[in-house]
Image: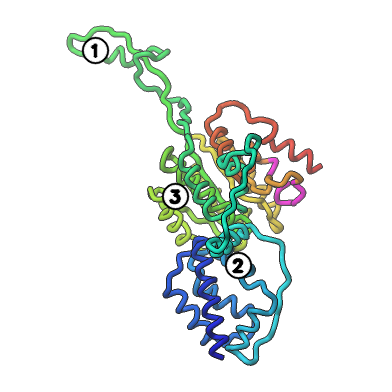
Amino acid sequence: MSEHSGALAENVLHFARALRAAGLPLGSGAILDALAALEIAGLRNREDFRAALEAVFVKKREHAAVFEQAFNMFWRRRFYAEQLIASLSPTEEASPQAQEKPAPAAARAAQALSATRASEQVEQVVEQDQRLTMSDAEVLRARDFAQMSAEELVAASRAIAMLNLREDMRPTRRFAPDARGARIDARRMFRYALRPGGQMELARRSPQKRKIPIVAICDISGSMSDYTRVFLHFLHALSVKRGHVQTFLFGTRLTNVTRALRHKDPDEALALCARETQDWSGGTRVGACLHRFNVDWSRRVLGQGAIVLLFTDGLEREGVEDLRLATQRLHKSCRRLIWLNPLLRYDGFEPRQQGVRAMLPNVDEFRPVHNLASVSALVQALSDHERPGADVDPRVWLKRAG
């Protein structure tokens, strides 16, 4: 019993170190709590063992995917976890699990696990011809957000914060005094002439310019969680540098997180967003949430020709007609509706799903948003006054759907 318990404690210690290398904030207290939980939980099988560790080690929703992949990799030796569980409970039930296809967070977990054994390996120097290879920056631009390691995600967040967000100023129907304006301001000239001792002076005016508001509506369901956090870093940079940005998150309900993203520190801003939303990495009701936005918020935030960034995969199975009507109303209420869909990262993507086909006729642009290159293209599109290219035209995708 004591020998098995010592092996269990040692393995839990190494497992916690791997999770800490993957980005989870774990200290010695969490390790002691995990060992205590394993002793008093009455474990019977591998799932109980995993649930007990997850309850202690996972403090935030975004850490759940990293924990799951790290657990599957660390305890992958057949029946080893079951043997350790047997030392704590004589009535344990073996339930070996089959290997599954690597999930998006697998790269981060694998890097953390391999880092713990890096000191035992001998470094080898290999001479390579790198004239035709890509630089680290080019590789990072093309790397999928869901396949990035912890270090690459940090580098991607820094690259997003350093994006050159140009001022997108548009003329309005209001005029302001301007000595070099193209129009003569007759009213101001007459007011000057009516003053005591006044004389007629030439006054000019020009249209006022203001930033076009941006409204982001982001899906935070389980299928989008690997991309939502990085996209929120982009919205945070957009809010700090550009301003006039309203942000809403939705899964099964709609949440306004505009004030949370106004904090200068991006980590604090995202932590506030996570605390304010109760349905992170859960289910999704795209049509119902868009309808709620149209009823409660469209008149407040879509004035002055706002641009709407709709960030979702559109995988809606129920209420497709309600989704079509909600998207249609949203399209009529804004200047441009840009649909950002991470599913476009697949070369063979076709809009066959009913929810996608219901939304496509009511958007102006259909863009991917899965790596730094696609985010840079989005920044260019927000500042470009020209007509979008054929590669983002939703009519092209409608033809593919037949």
- First in residue order: circle 2 vs circle 1: 2
Callout 2 amino acid: Glu
| Residue 350 screen position, x and y as percent | 76, 46
Viewer can see residue 44? yes
Mark 1 and mark 3: Cα distance apart in space: 48 Å
Q: Residue at x 73, y 46 (%)?
A: 357
Relative depth, front residue between 121 and 199: 121
Residue 101: assigned label: none
The N terminus, quarter of image: bottom right
Q: Which residue is mark 2?
A: 68
- Labels 3 & 2 near each other (Cβ < 8 A): no
Q: Could you say whether the residue bearing mark 2 is in a helix, strand or loop?
A: helix
Mark 2 and mark 1: Cα distance apart in space: 78 Å
Q: Which residue is mark 1?
A: 194
Q: Residue at x 21, y 13 (%)?
A: 195
Query: Which-is-in-front pick, marks 2 and 1?
Result: 2
Q: Could you say whether the residue bearing mark 3 is in a helix, strand or loop?
A: loop
Relative depth, front residue between 393 and 27: 27
Q: Which residue is mark 3?
A: 258
| Residue 17 screen position, x and y as percent | 50, 68
Does the magenta portion include 88? no
| Residue 21 screen position, x and y as percent | 50, 62
Task: Using residue 178 as the reference point, say whether residue 8 is left or right of it.
Answer: right
Extent of the magenta region: 349-361
Density class for disc 3 (Cα within 10 Å; few <14, some 14-19, many ≥20) is many
